[in-house]
Image (spheres, grey):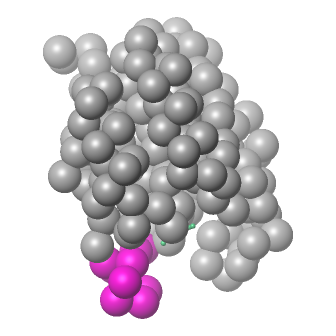
Amino acid sequence: MKILILNGPSLNLLGSRNPDIYGNDTLEDIQKSLQNIAKELNIDLIFEQSNHEGALIDILQKNSNCNGLIFNPGAFTHTSIAIADALESIEIPTIEVHLSNIYAREEFRSHSYIAPVAIGQISGFGSAGYLAALTLIHQFLQKK
Ligand code: DQA
């Protein structure tokens, strides 16, 4: 089972970016914790991050043979029809993850273009959301 973990803009700065909102874990910390779970569940993980909308779409298309996707699109969540269309085209079961609770923040964060093309969404549990998403996508794919 091969799962792509994809992070969008400014998530490379986790750890130092607004720790009150996004926590203290770096993307590398999250990656290490995910690898530990992946090892136990016999999952191959691919990690990618980009600050660019088109590059994220290229990464999605390049990895369209993955069994599942865990995706934090960052601010593109709220703006990108192009990323939503790309997800719809490649049809990979996707869990949308947000560290913060996007519904408890500014109004513009309450809308996600990604949610309708994802299996589900985890929002507000910090880095633990990624770990939960990996367990959940594993369960989802096993049942398929
Ligand atoms: C985020 C929430 C988005 O609104 C924001 O633009 C981000 C991070 C989160 O993980 O909470 O970049 O996706």
Residue 69 lies, in percent from the top left, at: 42, 32
> What predominant SS class does the magenta segment belong to?
helix
64 on left or right of 44: left
Residue 78 lies, in percent from the top left, at: 38, 69
Q: In the picture, residue 136 is in which quadrant?
A: top left
123 on left or right of 32: left
User: Between residues 134 and 88, which one lies in front from this camera angle?
Assistant: 88
The residue range painted magenta reads 101-110
Q: Which image quarter is the C terminus in?
A: top left
* Residue appearing at x 66%, y 54% in the figure: 51
Residue 26 lies, in percent from the top left, at: 77, 54
Query: Is residue 78 depicted above or below 3 in this figure?
Result: below
Is residue 117 visible to the viewer in this orientation of the structure? yes
User: Between residues 53 and 43, which one lies in front from this camera angle?
Assistant: 53
Q: Is residue 25 located in the magenta-colored stretch of the structure? A: no
* Residue appearing at x 48%, y 14% in the figure: 2
